[in-house]
């Protein structure tokens, strides 16, 4: 009984022990926060990577691709057919995306992936990442009614301006633009599409040009000169082009600060229904550059900045056609990769080994999605392990603090220990006092640390916004990191083992002082008193 009373008394009155409790609390809370953030980051990243890549990827060794023949399909079915839940063929190639905003063209390097939405949906939740598509719907290449109305509106306006300009050429005597007087009398009025006639033309006051024979060229009539797609690109501008794309959200949007509210919002320079230009190369040797226009059907947003700023999905058949990946004689279409979703993802390694035996190694390379993203996942795991070691040292420092404090108590309370032993306390009893005191420090420190850590994890994004507001500097910038906000995932067993580890360190730190106090002789302890 006296052991518990002494432990509680010293725990309440020895303020020096508060330093050890605070150190233990900070160490436990920091480990919980860091592990939860790293685990949340890793979990969300793995989920999104699997949604894009599928469980197993069969890739060709050449960007020219390999004909997706019946023989290859039969080999895959014979090897792992019973394990397959979904399968899709794709064409993946590097390309350049050009977007016109105002009078300027913006070009960015991208990864162009030709897909079939029906089969792609069987290997991953593609519709989940499309901004204007219902999550449970099967995506297709058709424009939504809103996107079609938007396209009709701006193409009608553009065509109206072209026709009015071409039907009202500038006067012949005005050969050059005059810089003495303003070129126009003011901004052009908006065209009145509701009225059938107008008394005044909005183009009555327009710049003087050097040659009246040069009329504005309709940008939608610009096809690929000298190519097989020139006729196709000269279709009605109000209807979508044959090439359709899902374009990464980060490629066509940028953040800006609203001057009225002060909030950062995203501004889109391309919307569904707009046209973009894509440049890539054909299959064969040597590859030839090709360019084609494509209609944006939807925006792809996975909330991973790396993918949202680099991926463009195109309809597979058109990409195979424009890259000359269709055999003119047999009609066989080449692909560069085959993605497979398994019924049991844990069997991925076994499936990879079977496919490596079934498929020719000189043509194909078989990998799991983890192998394909190996460097990224390995970097996250190594970083998490190093952080855990470093943060565990914080708890170890708290343990050394407990060790120092207990040695001080042992020296300071030498007389009291002698009195206790003279009254009949055993050496084991004295030792148990110090061990219980160390365990009590560990329990209080780890308990408070768990509460503080879990609260910090719960409100971590609110805390990040508060720190950003106070410092005026963005703590978690979505343009740098993968996600728009800090992702967290609390693993109960991780919290348990962190708390147990902290209490164990506290008890171990109290063993040496406890042994020293237990060896005190009552006569020696009271000799100079």
Image (cartoon, rainbow, N blue to C red):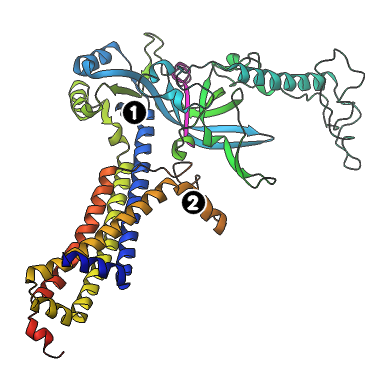
Numbered marks: total: 2
Residue 243 badge = none
271 left or right of 323?
A: right
Q: Earlier in the sequence, mark 1 or mark 2?
A: 1
Residue nearest the viewer, comparing 242 with 499:
499
Q: Please state the extent of the stretch shown in magenta in the rendering.
A: 309-324
Residue nearest the viewer, comparing 16 with 99:
16
Q: Is residue 236 magenta?
A: no
Residue 464 badge = 2
Number of residues whose C-alpha sits closer than 10 Å to that of mark 1, classed few (under 14), some (14–19) or many (20 or more): few
Quadrant that contains the N terminus: bottom left
Q: Position of residue 528 (x, y in %)?
A: 14, 91
Quadrant that contains the C terminus: bottom left
Residue nearest the viewer, comparing 49 with 497:
497
At a point 85% along the width and 21% down the height, the residue shown is: 168
- Reading the image, the residue beneath label 1 is 62
Residue 221 can be seen, yes or no: no
Q: Position of residue 248 (x, y in %)?
A: 50, 32
Q: Secondary structure at mark 1?
A: loop
Q: Residue furthest bottom?
A: 528
Q: For the residues marked 1 and 2, what is the alpha-carbon distance in whole angstroms?
A: 46 Å
Number of residues whose C-alpha sits closer than 10 Å to that of mark 2, classed few (under 14), some (14–19) or many (20 or more): some
Between circles 1 and 2, the one closer to the viewer is: 2
Residue 175 can be seen, yes or no: yes
Compared to residue 9, the image places residue 479 above or below, namely above
Residue nearest the viewer, comparing 218 with 406:
406
Q: Quadrant of residue 179?
A: top right
Compared to residue 496, the image places residue 164 above or below, namely above
Q: Position of residue 216 (x, y in %)?
A: 75, 25
């Amino acid at each position: 009984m006296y052991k518990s009373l002494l432990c509680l008394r010293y725990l309440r009155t020895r303020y020096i022990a508060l330093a050890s409790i605070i150190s233990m609390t900070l160490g436990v809370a920091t480990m919980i926060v860091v592990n939860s953030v790293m685990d949340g980051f890793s979990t969300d990243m793995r989920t999104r990577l699997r949604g894009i890549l599928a469980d197993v990827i069969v890739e060709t060794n050449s960007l020219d691709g390999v004909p997706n023949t019946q023989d290859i399909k039969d080999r895959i079915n014979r090897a792992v057919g019973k394990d397959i839940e979904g399968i899709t063929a794709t064409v993946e190639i590097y390309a350049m995306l050009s977007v016109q905003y105002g009078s300027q063209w913006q070009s960015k390097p991208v990864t162009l992936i030709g897909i079939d939405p029906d089969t792609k949906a069987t290997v991953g939740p593609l519709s989940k990442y499309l901004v204007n598509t219902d999550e449970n719907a099967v995506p297709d290449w058709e424009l939504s009614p809103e996107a079609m109305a938007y396209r009709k509106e701006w193409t009608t306006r553009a065509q109206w301006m072209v026709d009015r300009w071409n039907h009202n050429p500038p006067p012949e005597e005005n050969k050059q633009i005059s810089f003495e007087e303003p070129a126009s009398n003011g901004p052009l009025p908006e065209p009145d599409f509701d009225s059938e006639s107008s008394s005044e033309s909005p183009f009555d006051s327009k710049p003087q040009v050097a040659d009246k024979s040069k009329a504005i060229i309709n940008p939608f009539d610009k096809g690929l000169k000298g190519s097989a797609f020139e006729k196709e690109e000269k279709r009605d501008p109000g209807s979508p082009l044959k090439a359709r794309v899902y374009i990464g959200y980060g490629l066509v949007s940028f953040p800006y600060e609203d001057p009225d509210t002060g909030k950062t919002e995203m501004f889109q320079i391309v919307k569904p229904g707009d046209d973009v230009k894509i440049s890539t190369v054909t299959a064969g040797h040597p590859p030839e550059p090709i360019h084609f226009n494509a209609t944006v059907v939807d925006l792809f947003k996975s909330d991973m900045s790396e993918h949202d700023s680099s991926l463009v999905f195109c309809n597979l058949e058109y990409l195979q056609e424009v890259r000359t990946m269709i055999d003119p004689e047999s009609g066989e279409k080449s692909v560069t990769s085959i993605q497979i979703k398994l019924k049991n993802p844990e069997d991925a390694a076994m499936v990879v080994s079977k496919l490596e035996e079934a498929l020719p190694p000189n043509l194909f390379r078989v990998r799991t999605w983890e192998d394909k993203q190996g460097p990224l996942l390995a970097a996250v795991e190594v970083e998490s392990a190093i952080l855990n070691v470093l943060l565990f040292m914080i708890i170890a420092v708290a343990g050394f603090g407990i060790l120092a404090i207990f040695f001080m108590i042992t020296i300071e309370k030498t007389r009291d220990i002698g009195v206790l032993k003279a009254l009949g306390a055993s050496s084991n009893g004295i030792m148990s006092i110090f061990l219980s005191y160390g365990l009590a420090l560990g329990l209080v420190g780890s308990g408070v640390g768990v509460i503080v850590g879990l609260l910090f994890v719960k409100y971590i994004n609110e805390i990040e916004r508060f720190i950003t507001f106070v410092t005026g500097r963005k703590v978690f910038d979505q343009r740098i990191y993968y996600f728009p906000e800090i992702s967290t995932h609390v693993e109960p067993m991780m919290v348990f083992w962190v708390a147990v580890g902290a209490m164990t360190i506290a008890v171990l730190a109290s063993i040496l002082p406890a042994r020293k106090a237990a060896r005190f002789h009552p006569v020696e302890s009271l000799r100079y008193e």
